Image (cartoon, rainbow, N blue to C red):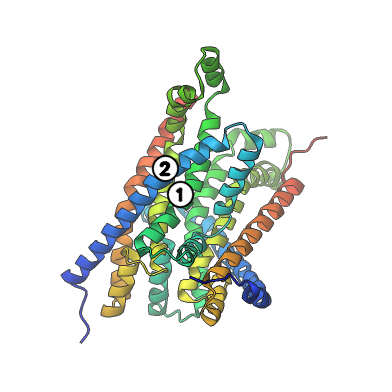
Amino acid sequence: MGYTLDFSVVWHAMPTLLWGCVGTLALALAGMTLAMMIGVAGVAARDAKAAWLRAFVIGFVEIVRNTPFLVQIFFLFFALPLIGLKLNPTATAIIALGVNGGAYAIEIIRGGVQSIHKGQVEAGYALGLHKGQVFRFIVLKPALRAIYPSLTGQFIMLTLTSSICSAVSAYELTSVAQRIESDTFRSFEVYFSVTFLYLGISWLLMLGFAAISHRFFSYPTR
Amino acid sequence: MTPHFGLPEFGFLLRGLQWTVLLTLVAFAGGCTAGLAIALLRTCGHKGVEWITRIYIGVFQGTPLLLQLFVVYYGLALTGLKLDAFVAVAIGFTVNASAFLGEIWRGAIQAVPRGQTEAAMALGLHYSSRMRDIVLPQAIRISLPATIGYLVQLIKGTSLAAIVGFIELARAGQIVSNQTFQPLLVFGVVGAMYFILCWPLSWWGSRMEARLALASQR
């Protein structure tokens, strides 16, 4: 057994890998944007008058949260062309991430909306705030503050989940790594390094989100 | 001629389901054991040890499960050990589970009121008795919903073993789908099987969470 580790292949491929990181971030960002839209629409539909619409949203959330993302993306990969959406793998991956993240976003946003007590709104009016101010200061900001940690955590989760999109060969870090691996046969070196690239991405995201939270959501001290 | 999705294909998926369940059980059992050790080390009071376990947990929570599997799978191959694919992926899921369960139980141990530990110390109980008889029984109760939640995550996560080539439910689905050219039906059935496995657990977990929340309100 004379295997010697050789990380130089990784070093040579670094520019390609860094572009893969950009691909992963773009994929996650697009997926999260779609997820937020599904989340907001889902929360509205969850309290709709039509019983079938409420049942649909509840069923959607339960099915997505209790099946693996890999099976979801395979299913969509074959189902989307049937409804006339012939998309490339990356677009398919964005939709799959959006659908998956959307189910979690519905639950998170719903929790945020429910956290605003009705008395708060009434107190706002009693203090003479007008409708826009009540929405902005009493409803929106505290609700965002309440769901911000779960939502950003969800974004990081989605970024890590996006590695599974390599299974349909979407453009992102893991599929880039797989291509380098099949060119160089340095499986361990490539995947070991890429794991730490992902760790770097999630730490950067965490720091960024903490900074945003500190800037916008800390309670006024004056 | 291509076979249609019939009883033999369904049987093949069921055998895949068996492997999914077995893989989950092995990884959960291993993860519970190692995770308890991680949780105890993480709360032991020694600064250096706490930092090391914290980094261990952080690395597993900050990287994709798929990449962890790749690293363990190819890393084990490098050591020259001829390991069965099942053993290799089971080890991968076990390490992952140890980090996540370790973090869940760390939180639960710290959620047990400090006075409990102090009272146990005042009674002269040593560390192992304090943990075994006083802190852990309460911590387990607190951690149960999150532990069940992780179990659901684990069941879904084992589908990634398909990507490194181990034939469990998801991989069995891919194979049948390629044979029958009925991907929607096959992946629909596969999804339903995962759902039947996960949904009762999710329901049980959220019900327990609601009951614990009620109990702590009183």
Mark 1 is surrounded, within 10 Å at the Cα level, by few (under 14), some (14 to 19) or many (20 or more) other residues, namely many
Residue at the outermost right position: A222
Identify the residue at image location x=31%, y=69%.
B173
**Among the 4 quarters of the image, the one containing residue A77:** bottom left
Identify the residue at image location x=43%, y=32%.
B140
| Residue at mark 2 | B32
- Amino acid carrying mark 2 in the image: Cys
Letter of the chain that mark 1 sits on in the rendering: B
Which is nearer the N-term, disc 1 or disc 2? 2
Per the model, the C-alpha gap separating discs 1 and 2 is 7 Å
Task: Determine the secondary structure under disc 1.
Answer: helix
**Among the 4 quarters of the image, the one containing residue A125:** top right
Left or right: B211 with respect to A139? left
Task: Determine the secondary structure under disc 2.
Answer: helix
Instruction: Name the disc covering residue A217, or none.
Output: none
Question: Compared to A131, does A124 lie above or below?
Answer: above
Residues at circles 1 and 2 in contact by the CB criterion of under 8 Å:
yes
Question: Compared to A218, does A49 lie above or below?
Answer: below
Identify the residue at image location x=55%, y=80%.
A184
Residue A57 seen in render: no
Image x and y of residue B90, in percent? 39, 56
Asked if badges 1 and 2 are on one and the same chain, I answer: yes
Identify the residue at image location x=58%, y=53%.
B59
Image x and y of residue B133, in percent? 43, 23
| Residue at mark 1 | B97
Mark 2 is surrounded, within 10 Å at the Cα level, by few (under 14), some (14 to 19) or many (20 or more) other residues, namely many
Left or right: A172 with respect to B208? right
Residue at the outermost bottom position: B1
